[in-house]
Amino acid sequence: MYLNKLEVFVLELVLGNKKITLEDLINVTRRGYKVKISDEAYEKIDKARKLVDKYVEEGKVSYGITTGFGKFAEVSISKEQTGQLQKNIVMSHSCSVGNPLPIDIARGVVLLRAVNLAKGYSGARRIVVEKLVELLNKEVTPWIPEKGSVGSSGDLSPLAHMSLVLIGLGKAYYKGELLEAKDALAKAGIEPIPSLSSKEGLALTNGTQTLTSTGAHVLYDAINLSKHLDIAASLTMESLHGIIDAYDPRISEVREHTGQINTAENMRKILAGSKNVTKQGVERVQDSYVLRCIPQIHGASKDTLEYVKKKVEIEINAVTDNPIIFVDTDEVISGGNFHGQPMALPFDFLGIALAEMANVSERRIEKMVNPAINHGLPAFLVEDGGLNSGFMIVQYSAAALVSENKVLAHPASVDSIPTSANQEDHVSMGSIAAKKSKDIFENVRKVIGMELITACQAIELKGAKDKLSPATKAAYEEIRKIIPHVDIDRPMYIDIHAAEDIIKTNKIVENVEKTIGELKY
């Protein structure tokens, strides 16, 4: 990173007040918006804390407050040991392995935990919520390894790594620099919490925030990538003199799927003014499916993104702790809101939808490079073929990524391994579903980049660049600022990486939308 100029984002977490959105999450994690806690939220936090203290003082049996955890739920903990119990859960549960979460996703974990605790159903003191907010506002990000959660009881291990930082242990980034947590806190001027009190270790570690932050960030980027997919498909249409009749609005209206309707509209807008695209019966009666069925194929993935977004925006506002504090009735009730199943299935679905985006993109690459089906373009889009191989192995690389995605798209949520001596006898594997969707997304972005550069090459060899629509011309010119035409063979990985980098900048979408207005997903 690091963060853009800080702006103010007021986080009001009172029940019935403004809920946060996916856009709000990204504003904090990537754009440096500051976070505040409302007075109403403080009031709820304090009331819940009083009830926890009452339970401890009266010696009432309540899971994780006056008992051990998991299989140790039947072990009573004395009043004097409740603080040590909470520190112990944070230390003992810090077992994650693998590469660290990216800083934006890790910031999302912190934010979503603050959202959860500030609702006043967890019983943590206000200092705990304040410290989470302080981490965000002063750019201290916990170092959280990405593997080690089974998604129930929530993301115990990665959230324990987050929680270590609050007490000065573990590792953290300060403005992007990885340090020991105590040093990162000191550089930021943050005092660690001297000690955790009853319920707080459990309240910090018991939830779905790691898997939710991971999947939410993938979703946000996937929505944008779906626009790149439509643009790439439009460039391919230009290069192959595709038949635009298939995007007639009447076809989509009689089927009524929103994603299909929106994709057909996007394609019509992007291709408006093109002198390359044709009508049915002029060059061909109809195109093959990867051109003719773009609204149906792209649209189905977009409908999935919309479904997942609805689930994400529920979960980022959800209370996922256990037990839950109900101050109105003076009750502390054990339940299962930590269980990741409500997000495991959507994130598996997200991975499948993303994989399909690459499937169709790769087939369009094949259609452009294969002389048997590319409507007169030279084999593998290169002059002096045989001496030069051109885009031959670009398609191989795309095929490899698509094939990898097919393995990754196998749902994680159909698996379960009991934990904690079978006390936790069904787990969601939601964290794996979210991580897989991220891995799939990164492959898809590369494949779409390959389609973009392949289509630009094909357009030039077709003699079509002076007949482009205003929108496809804007996309073509943005790509050609960075990646030149391939006259003779060169290391194509450079072009592929450059295409992916262009997608990351979002300049293609920005330039197209400046030309024709906002694209839909």
Image (spheres, rainbow, N blue to C red):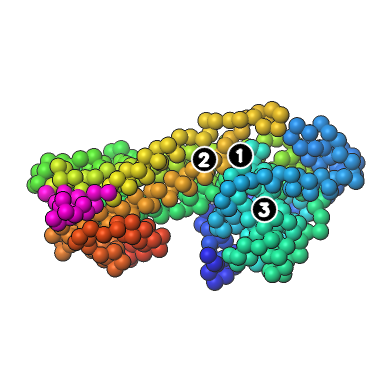
Residue numbers of the magenta segment: 376-393
Dot 1 alpha-carbon crowd within 10 angstroms: few under 14, some 14 to 19, many 20 or more: many
Closer to the camera, 508 or 451? Answer: 451
Q: Quadrant of residue 102?
A: bottom right
Dot 2 amino acid type: Ala
Q: Residue at x 63, y 60 (%)?
A: 141
Q: Describe the element under mark 3 as helix, strand or loop.
A: helix
- The answer to the question of whether label 3 and label 2 lie on touching residues, with beta carbons closer than 8 A, is no
Instruction: Tell me which amino acid carries mark 3.
Output: Met
Residue under circle 2? 433
Q: CA distance from mark 3 to mark 1?
A: 16 Å
Q: Nearer the viewer, residue 75 or 46?
A: 75
Mark 3 → mark 2, Cα distance in angstroms: 21 Å
Kindly indicate the quadrant of the structure image that contains residue 132: bottom right
Instruction: Find residue 203 and report its horizontal and vertical position in percent.
Output: 73, 47
| Quarter of the figure with residue 517 | bottom left
The answer to whether marks 1 and 2 mark residues whose Cβ atoms lie closer than 8 Å is yes
From the image, tell me which residue sits under label 3.
162
What residue is shown at x 32% (from left), y 43% (from top)? 399
